[in-house]
Image (spheres, grey):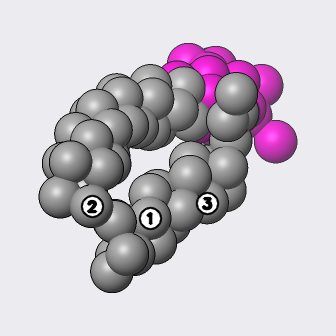
């Protein structure tokens, strides 16, 4: 199973190479194209989830910065 953006990129590149194989029969080409479409659709969803996780982590990090707290002026350094 592919677990990171580099793995997804590698998988998509492999699929493109297989689809570009001039020795494929028409039947196998159709199968590879269908497989490629399925993997591309799944990859979009996986990448969207990873992107959301990054945005959540960034917002949590920002929420923990001292400047994000509503401190009285006397307590601010």
Q: Does residue 68 show up magenta in the picture?
A: yes
Is label 3 or label 2 in front?
Answer: 2
**Residue 49 locus on image (x, y percent):** 44, 25
Which circle's residue, 3 or 1, is located before the other in the chain? 3
Q: CA distance from mark 2 to mark 1?
A: 12 Å
Tell me the tag on residue 18: 1
- Which residue carries the number 2 mark? 25
Residue sitting nearer the eye, 33 or 63: 33
Label 3 sits on residue: 10
60 vs 8: above or below? above
Separation of disc 3 and disc 2 at Cα? 24 Å
Q: Residues within 10 Å of mark 2 (few under 14, many from 20)?
A: few
Residues in magenta, as a range = 56-77
Q: Position of residue 14 (x, y in %)?
A: 54, 62
Residue 55 in view, yes or no: no
Quadrant that contains the N terminus = top right
Q: Residue at x 37, y 75 (%)?
A: 23
Q: In this orientation, which residue lies closer to the viewer: 69 or 48? A: 48
Instruction: Say which of 49 and 12 sits in front.
Output: 12
Q: Earlier in the sequence, mark 2 or mark 1?
A: 1
Indicate left or right for 58 with 75 as reference: left
- Kindly give the residue lying farthest to the bottom in the view shown: 22
Q: Residue at x 61, y 60 (%)?
A: 10
Mark 3 lies on a secondary structure that is: helix
Residue at left offset 82%, top offset 42%: 77
């Amino acid at each position: 199973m592919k677990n990171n953006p580099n793995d997804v990129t590698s998988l998509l590149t492999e699929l493109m190479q297989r689809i570009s194989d001039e020795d494929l029969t028409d039947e196998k080409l159709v199968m590879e194209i269908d497989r490629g479409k399925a993997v591309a659709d799944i990859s979009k969803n996986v990448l969207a989830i990873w992107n959301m996780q990054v945005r959540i982590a960034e917002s949590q990090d920002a929420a923990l910065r001292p400047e994000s707290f509503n401190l009285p002026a006397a307590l601010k350094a």
